[in-house]
Image (cartoon, rainbow, N blue to C red):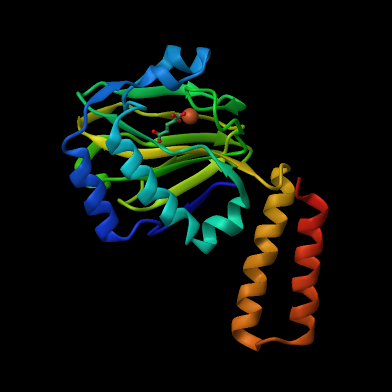
Amino acid sequence: MLLSLPGVLLDDEVTSIRGLLKQAQWVDGRTTAGIQAATVKNNQQLAEPDPLLAQIRRIVMQALHRDPLFFSAVLPDKILPPFVNRYAGGTNHYGFHVDNAMRSMPDGSARVRADVSATLFLNDPEEYEGGELVIQDVFGEQRVKLKAGSMVIYPSTSVHAVTPVTSGERLASFMFIQSMVRDAAHRRMLFDMDMALVKLRQQHGELAEVVQLTGVYHNLLREWAL
Ligand SMILES: O=C(O)CCC(=O)C(=O)O
Ligand SMILES: [Fe+2]
């Protein structure tokens, strides 16, 4: 499932992160890519020991933890600490690749199976030309470019790329998430059911049938969660 989540970051959080990034020391993005992906990756990233990265991670993780749509769509089990990237200079891009199945931190900690990949946009689409995230999956090809603070989630199994940023700079945080529910079809059914239940509850209150279906939701989650 490909889904855009608007307003994951509050405006003042975007402002804080942008302020921090003014002092950023960017390094070659290939350091964290897999072998195939490194051959097509041409961008920049914050380096792991950079204290700015730790501060940005705190803000992003706090935002993810309070976002009910993110929780419902991803059912996160483990989130690899988010990274921050930049595409600029008229040529930066990321060619077609699939994210490595297993990701861990450079020191070997926090091994995560990538089920869901996400890009959280840190600046607005008007600030750069190009820089579309192109995602190919069973739903065809989708091109995504969102406003600052919004995030797109997509299956880590999909082939995807970022088109060249021909002017300006594109700033984003990207991350890999292991879901409690490994099967994407199961995750999708749970998400649809949860969204329908939220609407039913708003329109009709706590009907006995809503309570019963909520029970079914949780019982399916119990069946499918690893
Ligand atoms: O910059 C992006 O939006 C995606 C980056 C990406 O695909 C990756 O780092 O694996
Ligand atoms: Fe990727």
State the residue at coordinates (44%, 49%): 61
192 on left or right of 59 = right
164 on left or right of 72 = left
Give whichever of 194, 134 is nearer the camera: 194
Q: Where is residue 12 in the image (x, y as percent from the top left)?
A: 25, 59
Does residue 55 sit above or below 206 in this rendering? Answer: above
Please identify the quadrant where the C terminus is shown. Answer: top right
State the residue at coordinates (62%, 74%): 198
Does residue 6 sit above or below 76 in this rendering? Answer: below
- Report the label total: 0
Does residue 137 sit above or below 30 in this rendering? Answer: below
Q: Where is residue 3 in the image (x, y as percent from the top left)?
A: 52, 51
Q: Where is residue 17 in the image (x, y as percent from the top left)?
A: 26, 47
Q: In the rendered image, which quarter is residue 131 located in?
A: top left
State the residue at coordinates (73%, 43%): 183
Give whichever of 142, 211 is nearer the camera: 211
Q: In the rendered image, which quarter is residue 85 located in?
A: top left
Q: Position of residue 147 (x, y in %)?
A: 31, 51
55 on left or right of 75 = left
State the residue at coordinates (57%, 24%): 100
